[in-house]
Amino acid sequence: MSRPIEETQKIIDEVMDAYPEKTKKDRAKHVKPNDPTGTCSTCQVKSNIKSRPGVMTVRGCAFAGAKGVVWGPVKDQITVSHGPIGCGQYSWWSRRNYYNGQTGIDTFGTMHITTDFQEKDIVYGGDKGLEAALHELKELFPLARGIGILSECPVGLIGDDIEAVSRRVSAEFGIPIVPVRCEGFRGVSQSLGHHIANDTIRDHILGKGKLEKTTPYDVNIIGDYNIGGDAWASRKILEEMGLRVVAQWTGDSTVNEIAIAHQAKLNLIHCYRSMNYICRHMEEVYGIPWVEFNFFGPTKIYESIRKIASHFDDQIKENAEKLIEKYKPMMDAVIEEYRPRLEGKKVMLYVGGLRPRHTIGAYEDLGMEVVASGYEFGHNDDYKRTYPVMKEGAVIMDDATLYELEEFTRRLKPDMVGSGIKEKYSYHKMGVPFRQMHSWDYSGPYHGFDGFPVFARDMDMTVNSPTWGLIRRNRKERR
Amino acid sequence: MKIRDHNELFKEQEYTEQFERKKEFENPWPPEKVKEIAEWTKTKEYRDKNFERKHIKINPAKACQPLGAIFCASGFEGTMPFVQGAQGCVAYFRSHLNRHFKEPLAAISTSMTEDAAMFGGLNNMLEGLENAYSLYRPKMISVCTTCMAEVIGDDLNAYIRQAKEKEFIPDDLPVPFAHTPSFVGSHITGYDNMLKGILSTITAGKKTAQQIKLNIIPGFDTYTGNIREIKRLLNLMGVKHTVLADVSETYDSPNSGEYKLYPGGTPLAEAADSINSIATIALQKYSTQKTLDYIRKEWGQKAISLWPIGIRNTDILLEEISSITGRRVPQEIEDERGRAVDAMVDSHPYIHRKRFALVGDPDLLLGLISFIMEMGGEPVHIVCTNGDKTFREEANNLLSESPFGVNGKVHIGKDMWHLRSLMFTDPVDLLIGNSYAKFLWKDTGTPLVRLGFPIFDRHHLHRSPIIGYQGALNMITRIVNTVLDEMDRKTMHTASFDVIR
């Protein structure tokens, strides 16, 4: 159901009223009623701008984007949280980037490794300690294929030269040692961290390896972090189509996969926000085209399979149709089971990366409607991709605050909210069904044909749990 | 409809075959090489190499100061924790506490970026205070810092003064502050610094006549059940008291269909009057040292720390409270003691001479060492990433008091990768630690009892006390049943699979 743009604007204005003047002026530019046609000149949200101090933004930092999102999942490299203890501690195995391997021996994904800066490191610099640390790591973990040095705030502020240390030690060890300047104060959100991480992949790893045998069907999965096994479920589809997946970026990936990825024929990008940089680079330098796809929910999966197949020969196109034919009955059965319980339910999303738009189709497959959606760290190009897939008058939010999320929930009355851990429990207290849509609330996969049944089950348990009905609101309200 | 999620899906043949195919691109080490290195990491040679390292921490068990500071601040009525510095830190602190407690937590960042790094964070602080006050209407804003603000040297005192002078916030709004650099100490230090900051601000000018009531400081204690337990005990004894940083409602609030930003906390008026109490008892030592010093010196109050984990420690606490307040320990509490001891006597055959590895914060470890020895267990490997030399001495003294402590060795500044080496070269029967210790359980097969912080992968444990006699009973229940579960697992295919134990 759509709502007139003016009506939604009125709701937004009411919410903005609580802000002090300067902040109100700023925040009003970030929250808009949706216009799918693109003709409303005042409906474009501003994005990728500094958060106002003190409003309780949900955003994280460049370190979170570089270490937590992009580099952390590369399984056979040691990722060092370089600086004080906290950043590595709080980002320790919190994103569920599943991988195969023996942790601590040939893979290191679930480990928290840090230089644990002390006051003397701030005063005298941390480079010497870092160099010694790299030697200790090499001794203890001889099978590491690389080491990433992910800088925390103080490293950039005290003027350490981690690049020099990396160059020296990398030459000595004969493995890549990648300095990543992802100090948390850089940029306005996680997003710059993704970009910085992409750049270091480009400068230190990409193109450095060689794939012995290539085929016309070689592709890379870009921007899938294998949360709850997402990339594996996506890979399964691509392999069944007759494609050969060379590299998974970066869920369950290895340094070698990244090093040989430039030999693929096509880049398939799922999370555009975090990885479009490297696709553009590979297109420019290696002439590899890239295509955006969406493996959430059958409608988008079928569409994406056909879109991907269109880049290949008739055999692949035929395989694609056969594949859709094979899975359609299973997908229909899922919809038949869950749609009656979810039909007409309203969803509010506030997430990051690709999810504020990519999951909409999956909700719609289940008969649900996304009435508000927003990005923690989106850019203009994300919003442009979002307007057409949402109904008129839906609320679009950029860098929403706790206050705004609460107010829009009160006014739009969604039947469920999908957002992150910081939001989860306030919604539980409000009695609003909630699902974490960063970590899949410890479930997953949500991608692919194997992911959709899990998605459907999880949304059903969220909306229809009898526990919500046990909540007794205060007496005044009940009367 | 049968739904297969990640727990089952990836064991299926179609996926295990996919994983094999993927290896073509991974450049994996040969399996025999991986096996060789895996075995090598279990050796004494590897342990020695591991203990030689000085410049890198691997799976450390500590967090940073501002986490402790906001935890402390969240235990006061209407208080907004406010962090001057880069914004990602606050996202991390909130997530970390949300994951442990399964509860919401509001906290503010001033979102400092590159320009603040150049010109200082004054503007961020001013606008941050104005916005936070307008939107979230706190009764107190409690300011601490991230590394960024500390490295560039932001002057909190001057900034807050300016914010009041320029009327960004009301002049009478209490805005205590603490410098909490992450490169000094750990979360327990941050708790201490913030509590001292808060108490010195809100008690200023409040000294009147001393009253017979006690201040209780829980310390960086993430068991909301502990706070409820100490209050219950004090109420049973008829002792008037104020819990300073009472986080029990903050992290365990009833679901009433309404989200409250500030669900509980020590009432500010009561906290202000804490300066007039007869004494202050902290239930942790290492997270309250500066605060207790301050209370002794500035308030002239008796201030001691006791950690009531285990029977004898609880005895000492109750006797101390009794002697300070003149109130007797009632029979009801004595009966609770009797029940806890009865349980320990009944379960002793399964604990006696069992060897334990422990990892956690210093105060928790001291309590556990004492409790384990009371049950006849042996603390063997004691790893404290954020422990100092004083802690080591105290722990060693404790171990030397009991024949069950002879095999105990205390490792300060060490981490869970050190502990892994210790557990391979000198195995133990049980491991006690936080959720991240499950990697040690996985590697060594040693059963894990989850005690401490953070616990992300088991629900509701923070609600049951581990202090007092009731806490002892809760812990013995969990420990002995972990032993019995493990015994069942190990004997399920043998004749020893007993039904009565």
Image: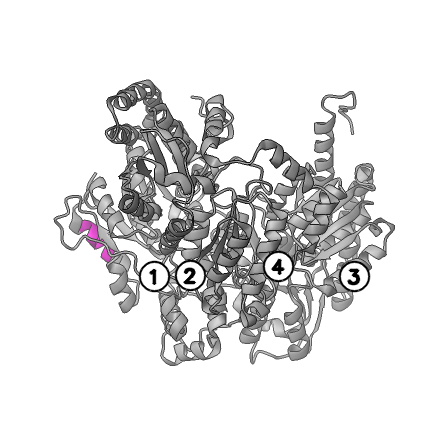
Separation of disc 2 and disc 1 at Cα?
Answer: 9 Å
Q: Give me the disc on residue B87.
A: 2
Separation of disc 3 and disc 2 at Cα?
Answer: 46 Å
Q: On the rendered structure, is A113 left or right of B124? A: right
Q: On the rendered structure, is B406 left or right of A211? A: right
Separation of disc 3 and disc 4 at Cα?
Answer: 45 Å
Q: Give me the disc on residue A51.
A: 1
Q: Amino acid at mark 2?
A: Gln
Q: Amino acid at mark 4?
A: His
Separation of disc 4 and disc 1 at Cα?
Answer: 36 Å
Mark earlier in primary sequence (3, 4): 4
Separation of disc 2 and disc 4 at Cα?
Answer: 28 Å
The image position of residue B494, as x and y in percent, is 76, 21
Q: Chain of mark 2?
A: B
Task: Please tell me which residue lies in front, A185 or A155.
Answer: A155
Would you name the residue on which mark 4 appears? Answer: B55
Mark earlier in primary sequence (3, 2): 2
Q: Chain of mark 3?
A: B
Task: Please tell me which residue lies in front, A189 or B126.
Answer: A189
Image quadrant holding the N terminus of chain A, namely top left
Q: Which residues are magenta?
A: A7-13
Say what secondary structure mark 4 lies in. Answer: loop
- Callout 2–callout 1 Cβ contact below 8 Å: yes
Would you name the residue on which mark 3 appears? Answer: B319
Q: On the rendered structure, is B12 left or right of A31? A: right
